[in-house]
Image: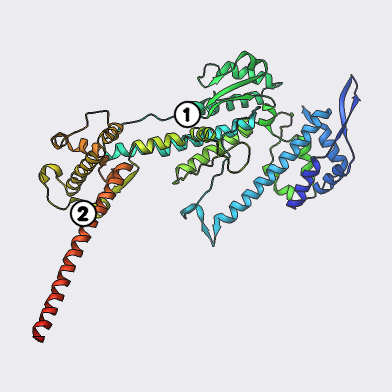
Amino acid sequence: SILRLITAILHCGNITFTHHHESNQHSMSDACSMDMTHSSVSAARLLGVKYDDFSYALTYRDIMAGNEVIHSPLDKTASVKACEALMKALYGALFDFIVQRVNDSISQHNGFDREEGSASIGVLDIFGFEIFNTNNFEQLCINYTNEALQQQFNKYVFKLEQEEYEKEGINWKWITFPDNQDVLDLIDRKHTGMLALLDEQCIVPRSSDAKLARYLYAKCNGHARFSATSAQKADFQFSIEHYAGPVEYSTEHWLEKNNDQLPVSSANLLKGSELDLLSKIQKFICMEDRQGRGSVASTSVGAQFSVQLSKLRARIDATVPHYIRCLKPNDAMVPDNFDPEMIVDQLRCGGVLEAVRVSRAGYPTRYPHDVFKARYYILGCGKANGDKMIMGGDTEVERLIGKIAFSIWQADHEEKGHEAKSFHNTITNGDDYPETVEQFLALDFSSRCTVAGLQLGRSKVFLRREALDRIETLRAEKFGVSALAIQRIVRGVQARDYFKLFWRKVMHSA
């Protein structure tokens, strides 16, 4: 049945119409008739409806005026749109039907309800920002989704990262990050957002795309992210400043695309179909009201899209997301061609460069106190001049951190010189870099940790990338020295035992 319905939809795409004039009691009106071709006959047969009823549904529109039904003929352009609306309604309803069947089948497994606590993995695949020569309602919805998901990315990578630093009470310099909430408000804010304004125009009698454009200019002109030049207004266009850059949109066919509802005549046609599958997908089809207008705004494409996106964001908030950024190396679609400028632009648009900057400026590696002590305890062993002053602190982990911080500063100071000072200035407010041991010991505990590139939080130890590399090097060196010492002692014992055995044999021979 699914393949049969898909075949019918494909045949509908080949249906043609012939224009003619139709007279009534008062005047002549433009009308058309559906051409009887192999595609039109096959489409009617596969849909399980009579050919004459199928032809009437695509060439006439039924409008209720009180208790009277008015049969209004459609011109050729309107009939083509009616056929397209039927195709979109059938395909969309079939898609929703299949998705529901799949969801129902995987939500129940051996009587266990997945929603009640079992683990799950979801994959969200989105193409990304769309900026074409002509951008329409579809591009606005896609870019609106990208804006919303970018805010999720900001929240997860930027806000939560810095909030954890604050929660742990470490010395952290707040950095600015892009926040696109104003763009989301421009598009989907209740009552004043562009989608809400579009819904208003969809239920206003005799509205048009031109009236919609003028309405958007009047309501959104003061928004910082919205702009429309005189040339754009002449073509009923406008621009939105997205995080990925400005995008120019055309309002052509917005009302039609936002309604996206099936005419009553077509809906009644499907109700009389002999195909059982059509009766099952009827609930997924939206149709006009009996007066020939779209139904309430809550059923519009924009409203449905906004609700579904809100549910998606809520679901992402309840999970632990992992992001995979796909980059397009060139526009030529050829191998071994890497366009650096194009790649950087994609990284910037995707917020990846900002994420890298935050990661490098912050503390990407972190250990719980007990794990840190278990791994790096060896760096706190041994005696040195001024060990008490160097280590300081009241707890074991504080003393270990103090010793490690001094070791890092000492190693960096000896090896890097000016480079170490530059490293320090990138993670502090530019305070004077300690040039001597006395200057280093004069700093408080938190400042010593900042100089070394690590911080002691309430429950975790935070490490910069450079500090982690240095600590791992120091740990390897310490283990190397200890291994040599053990080897020296063991070999010494073995050598003495061998000598004693050799001496006893020599004396016995003598």
Residue closer to the observer: 69 or 306: 306
Kindly identify the residue that appears in the image at 52 percent across and 49 percent down. 122
Residue 103 point in image, percent of width and height: 59, 51
Q: Which amino acid is tagged 2?
A: Ile
- Marks 1, 2: nearer the viewer: 2
Write down the quadrant of residue 211 in the picture: top right
Asked if residue 440 lies left or right of residue 100, the reply is left
Q: Position of residue 383 (x, y in %)?
A: 12, 50
Q: Which residue is at the front of the view, 226 or 267?
A: 226
Residue 315 position, x and y percent, is 49, 43
**SS class, disc 1:** loop
Tell me where residue 67 appears, x and y as whole percent. Answer: 79, 29
Residue at x-position 55% and y-position 54%: 107
Residue for badge 1: 180
- Residue 214 relative to residue 318: left or right: right
- Locate residue 507: give its quadrant: bottom left
Question: What label sits on residue 378 in the rendered view?
Answer: 2
